[in-house]
Amino acid sequence: MRTYLLLVALLLGPAISLSLADEWPQWMGPGRDNIWREEGILPAFPAGGPRVLWRAPVAGGYSGPAVAGGRVYVTDYVTADDVKVPNFERKQFSGIERVHCLSQQDGMLVWHHEYPVKYTMSYPAGPRCTPLVDGQLIYTLGGEGNLICFEAATGKIVWQRNLVEQYKTKTALWGYASQPLIDGTKLICVVGGDNSHVVAFDKRDGTEIWRSLSSPEQGYSPPTIIEAAGVRQLILLRPDAVTAVDPDTGKPLWSVDYEATSGSIIMSPIHAGEYLFVGGFSDQNLLLRLGKDRPTAEEVWRNLKKHAVSPVNVQPFLDGDTIYGIDQSGVFVAFDVASGKRLWETPEPFSSGRPVQSATAFIVRQADRYWLFTEQGDLIIAELSKSGLKQLDKAHVIDPTNVAFGRDVVWSAPAFASRCAFIRNDKECICVDLAERK
């Protein structure tokens, strides 16, 4: 069977080969580390840019696609209201959130589910969280806290929860944006409410297993599990603290105060040896040293001016003892983890050629190169090192369809699978061929 599929793939040529392909089943990929592990990727773009193999219509959303099992899953929001509103304005909008299952081969619709929802959040274009595929099940989390588990093949609902209603909480300013996490038989979600900042559900039937902590708001940082001092620790970046809990019970292990301006703590924490780095809006950055013999954490430095990175939309990337990231000021930086000292900064790769507030370029590593997807809709192949950023090639693949800070943007993270990039804006989801042709 494997030989037959490979023969079919060779005969089809530009069609997507699924038999030997990697997948991108969740936010930041299979390992939630933004590493694309496939080989056979083109070293440079062909003349005129890479081929778009298919296009599928979608509506508004910041959520990225997920790719698994020959399917592409993407969520969006359909409304007659004008949702291109000023940055911090918070009104009520009526519309429908949708979950689409597309064929990875040609982008044709396999199934979809929709439900009415009133948006109360700022930046109300659509959902934020990438679908999460776990075997035969797929989980989606809508912008207003609608958590749904589907059969991946059919779209049949297995279970669902309305987090705002069930936990008597309120949607955060910028909506539910913390990507849920699978841990064994648990689905761990940032929820909100009294003693339910984080909740672990049984991923099979939605039964609550444990709940833990209270915070002034949900924040937007995804729950992340690390191992330190020989102990598995669930790290939670909350609006008022960085906290570790036992992922099996929710019992707190340690906590360090951290005040996130406007509740804007977004990045996933970075575990770098003995250190844990976090950063956020309003020039905030924090380095903790983790205990070696027992689960503890102590502050090394905090809020160093013109040091480290204070990210907003873009997850920083760890490479050895260096972190690459995009600061809220709009510069791409590299810094030494232990000291926070910046090794370099540049307004590249943005076409404006100058720093702009909350500039966005998602960072993914493949082999010894990096793929950057910018808010202008450009794919860039680059080298990143302690010496600087070297742009190898660039192609425009999709148009920005939303607005932020007075400029046109596309703020949805791509997926990389089957030697393709799957990219969406507020009008379409596309499949871009990145396979090397010999």
Image (cartoon, grey):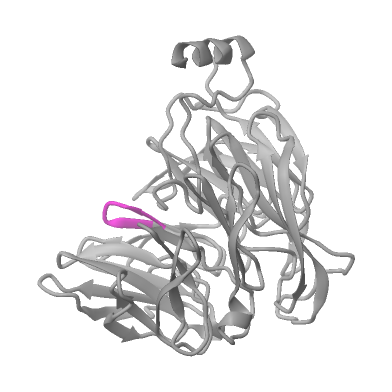
Above/below status of 302 relative to 57 = below
Residue at x 50%, y 70% (from the top left corner): 266
Give the answer, above or below, for where 110 lies relative to 217.
above
Residue 293, position in %: x, y? 10, 72
In the drawing, does residue 183 fall left or right of residue 115? left
Q: Can you say whether 397 is above or below 201 in the image?
A: above
Which residue is pictured at 28% across the width and 63% down the height?
226
Q: Residue at x 27, y 69 (%)?
A: 233
Could you tell me if residue 258 is visible in this image? yes
* Magenta region, main secondary structure: strand
Task: Name the residue nearer the viewer: 406 or 18.
Answer: 18
Q: How many marks?
A: 0
Residue 69 percent coordinates (x, y): 53, 36
Q: Residue furthest left?
A: 293
Residue 269: percent from the left, percent from the top?
A: 38, 67
- Left or right, 264 with reference to 185: right
Observer-nearest of 140 and 185:
185
Q: Which residues are magenta?
A: 317-323
Image quadrant in which you'd find residue 251 = bottom left
Q: Is residue 307 visible?
A: no
x 52%, y 21%: residue? 436
The image quarter in which residue 177 lies: bottom right
Give above or below for 400 relative to 270.
above
